[in-house]
Image (tube, coloured by chain):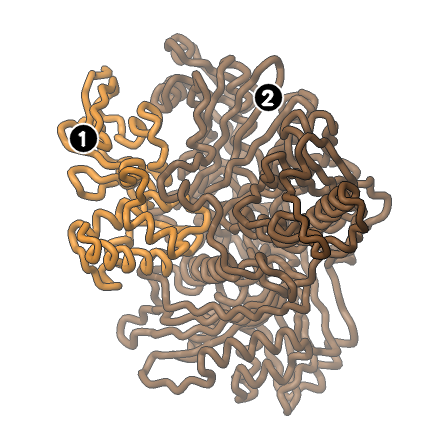
Amino acid sequence: MSNLTQKFLLEPERYELSSGSLHHFAMERREFFKLLGAGIAVFAVAKDALAQETAPSHGVHSHELPKEISAWLHIGEDGSVTAFSGKAEMGQNIRTSMAQNVADELRVPFESVRLVMGDTALTPFDMGTFGSRTTPTMTPQLRRVASAARDLLLETAAKEWNVAPEKLKAADAKITNPGSGKSVSYAELARGKTLAQNIPAEDPVTPPVEWTVAGKPLPKVDARDFVTGKHEYTPDVRRPGTLYGKVLRPPSFGATLTSYDDSAAKAMSGVTIVRDGDFVGAAAASEREARNALAAIRTQWKETPQISNRELFSYIKQNATNKDEDRFRKQSGSVEAGLAQAAHRLEATYTVAFIAHAPLEPRAAVAEWADGKLTVWTGSQRPFGVRGELADGLHIPENDVRVIVPDTGAAYGGKHTGDAAIEAARLARAAGKPVKVTWTREEEFTWAYFRPAGVIEVKAGIDGDGKLTAWEFHNYHSGASGIETPYAVANHRTEYHQVPLILRSGSYRGLAATANHFARETHMDALAHAAKMDPLEFRLKNISDPRLREVVEAAAKSLGWPRKKTQPGRGFGLGAGFEKGGYVCTCAEVAVDPTTKNVRVVRLVTAFECGAVVNPDGLRNQVVGANIQGLGGALFEAIEFENGRILNPRFSRYRVPRFRDVPEIQAVLVDRKDIAPAGAGETPIMGVAPAVGNAIFDAIGVRLNNLPLVPHGVKV
Amino acid sequence: MPKSIQIEVNGKQYPVEYEPETPLLYVLRDELGLTGSKYGCGEGQCGACTVLISGKPRRSCQIPVSAAVGKPVTTIEGLEKDGRLHPVQQAFVDAGAYQCAYCTPGMIMSSVGLLQENPNPSTMEIVQFLQGNLCRCGTQPRIVEAVQHAAKAMQEGGR
């Protein structure tokens, strides 16, 4: 682990990032203009760029940071604007929203802005596209470079016309002198120049109330390429002479090779076999030939007994570490005293299963070597992290590795590691030709990492008025995100307990905030019922944060809470919370069939507030999408495993939401122009599971404390 | 043993040499360079590889290339005519019916197949028909909306 990684504390459940290196990219100015042609370039020097990349909740040490170029922008001689960001597009629509910010701040038409993203040779260093960090970090950074570029253009025109820059106006990609009526386009100003400027991080930018391009529901950039099949995702990248690579997977996790004979495979023509430690792979002219070659290798493996999901939760409880770090523990007052004074006390245990991201584009990479240098195309959320993994794994200097991330077929937190990239690069080096590795769905379900399972214990008390008097909350293994209650309570204790990894685990949209909100909001609902109070009224009584109150009231109003039950088996529930700068409340309506006990989610209403909205259309897509994805984990998704094997590594055995599962969904966007924009990729998923579980209780009086709620068919 | 066969894709004849049981998807993608059809699961569960064979939507990961001989195959690349998007493609753009868009080609091909068979489907019929197409980003409501708009546009435009 590099020093920098140690310095910045990430959420503990980002298990997949516990190793790997952080490196800084520095591009020669000369190279920059060689690449893009003449024009005007502006580099943002944001001394706090890296600090902003980490979650502030566990204490970030921002001292001793190198000055860092965090974003840059180029205005070409034809007036085209190119902005550079190390972030990756994977469906969250940031290619569009970032371009909106640039166009807005630079005062140019949206169509003239192009984003170059996720390319370690061209874009600034970026820790990764995760943690809902793109909008809060890139909005100010791109706006600062754009604003500095605008200033530079104003100064250049002012010098040419011999007037004070303050007398001039920038609009519609032109500098105009309202006094004389003269104007000059950005393109003309950029012609023949190689101007470059660094800017300080604190430059003022346009406030959201004055946005003209941002804040609008502009359509996705490159839409035509996506509906015509022209866009090249990583598995679609074709390089001359590309071979197809396959990797021999062990029969179970952690199995080691004890005997190996590849003589038959090596005799096959056009096949390259690589054995490097326990890595065994083949490259050939087609996937079929590569697969056949692997099938011809005779191996024996030593396997180790491992736990299975039937003993999962007892294992988690028994293996929790006793000596947890202080940063995972928060407390004030006395929970014991708070419970003693409570009119109602409630204690419950909640569990969440391992689930898979299952992005439709599986992990894939194309690796190509030329003159000892390596270029890899791969669908990843961490192009620079993967560059480090490749350099480490292949023992080459990082400067000899370039990672390019084509706009990717989704990730949901699942594409932080460079597994396919390393496999393709290792095979390509041996084969002497470019190699493409595309994981099968089964590999994706087996060898990627999972959202960690967990056990959550909650103990709480309320007084006769329904105010919380005590709150104690323990999360074992699943994670610490969203663990702290947003409700006002003087006596509380929350703790996250680490457990040695059971399956390969890591980030998943929202991290453990989904599990923690499920437990907390289910418990809150149960407390309300214990006190015979309306669950909405009970929450409003205990909310002190006005932003949380606003989304809870907005969602309840849109649903029409309290709803009268017109049919037997109908029920309504809600779940709310705050995480990563966003506030969410989801209300659910369910219908439970009185005879079959089938549960159908009829309607979801989600109110979401993440400050000023950059693109309401994209945001709506993210909110609705998170709700639908959240239904999977809420209702039926669970990885089944036994003795180091995944038992349901296929869509036919691992149920994800399909068209018939999708209810009527309403996204209520609360646009707060007075608050800097936060990210939206994760938080809208958090309220779904508790809202649905609470609605099931409302419908039939059965309290479900385990995620998924109704895994075996949709039955209670 | 590889066999020389001829298949018709998007109105063009392609001679291909392939093991006859190779799924059509791999021939389209790796041999013909038509990468618009996607691999998503390899078991006909996700619909990302959907193409039209004789006008009917089929999972190209499940169809051996030999079964496509003598039958016209249409892929996502074959929908656009003279620089004009097919009404279903246009409807997906208008509705913003995608996020990562990896499922989009398969969704569009299935929807084109549906509208050929049933030019005026109800919401429930669209939902039923697209049940075999996965969108992991959760864009289903907009996809249904796009198919409805496309149906209307095709009826008005007489396509």
Residue at image mark 1: B68
Q: Is residue A615 above or below residue A577?
A: above
Farthest residue, direction right: A64
User: Hey, what amino acid is under mark 1?
Assistant: Ala
Q: Quadrant of residue A470?
A: bottom right
Q: In what quadrant of the picture does the C terminus of chain A appear?
A: bottom left
SS assignment at label 2: strand
Q: Chain of mark 1?
A: B
Farthest residue, direction left: B70
Residue in the image at 51% along x and 20% along y: A427
Q: Is residue A692 above or below residue A645?
A: below
Taking the image as shown, residue B61 lies to the left or right of residue B94, namely left
Q: In what quadrant of the picture does the N terminus of chain A appear?
A: top right
Chain A rendered in what hue? brown
User: Hey, what amino acid is under mark 2?
Assistant: Leu
Residue in the image at 43% along x and 25% along y: A238
Chain letter, colour orange in render: B
What whole-number distance in Å separates the C-alpha atoms at marks 1 and 2? 39 Å
Q: Quadrant of residue A663?
A: bottom left
Residue at image mark 2: A374
Residue in the image at 64% along x and 61% along y: A677
